[in-house]
Amino acid sequence: MIAACATGSSMPPAPAEGHPDTVDVEAAVRGDRAAFQRIYQRHVGRVHGAVYRLAGYDHARAEDLTQEAFVRAWQKLDSFRGQSAFGTWLYRLAVNVALMDIRARGADPVGFMDEDSLPDHGETPFCAAEREELEHAIGRLPPRARAVLVLHDVEGWRHEDIGLELGMAVGSSKAQLHRARGLLRKALGEDS
């Protein structure tokens, strides 16, 4: 079970010269499993945090996607060229794994929130459960709207990058973001 959950919201910075990733990646490419284990321990929190948000805050799905991302990283390690930080490469690979899962599931009826099915919360008092309520509401967004919202508002991606990654026009990315925000406002009982 994955115990770590990332709180950061942007891609990791490029490593400094002599960064442990550099040494461990070179060793892991040669088959050193202990080196890959160190890579895993250094990056599992950030990877899990990103896929957890993209998976609609579904713990079990996020764990599966995190594991899938690290399996793919191990399989594709020799394709890492060092043109970016290893953490950036791994992060993008993990996001791609999560996005492929979203595409494969299509409009998942379990995670789909239609505007007529939203509860009327009225005024919600400030409490410790607000974060959970927000995560639940994000998790119930339609998959593509959720992906755009998470990538743009949480992960800090530009609409151009989101459009390329999700195979949609920049305008569609902006429209999905607007839709997601509107559904969230309605789900959380806020006025537009």
Image (cartoon, rainbow, N blue to C red):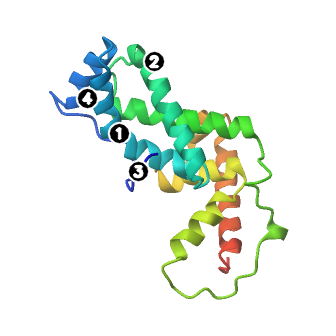
Of the numbered discs 1 and 3, the one sitting upstream in the chain is 3
Q: Does dot 4 land on a helix, a strand or a loop?
A: helix
Q: Nearer the viewer, mark 1 or mark 3?
A: 3
Of the numbered discs 2 and 4, the one sitting upstream in the chain is 4
What's under tag 1, amino acid-wise?
His
State the residue lying farthest toward the right: 116
Q: Nearer the viewer, mark 3 or mark 4?
A: 3
Q: Are marks 2 and 4 in contact (CB under 8 Å)?
A: no
Of the numbered discs 1 and 2, the one sitting upstream in the chain is 1
Q: Mark 2, residues whose alpha carbon is within 10 Å: few (<14), some, or many (≥20)?
A: few
Alpha carbons under labels 1 and 3: distance apart: 12 Å
What's under tag 3, amino acid-wise?
Ala
| Residue at left offset 64%, top offset 58% | 139
As drawn, the label of residue 76 is 2
Q: Are marks 1 and 3 in contact (CB under 8 Å)?
A: no
In this picture, residue 7 sits left or right of residue 32: right
Q: Which residue is mark 1?
A: 43
Alpha carbons under labels 2 and 4: distance apart: 15 Å
State the residue lying farthest toward the top: 30
Q: Does dot 2 land on a helix, a strand or a loop?
A: helix
Alpha carbons under labels 3 and 2: distance apart: 25 Å
The location of residue 190, given as percent across then percent down, is 65, 79
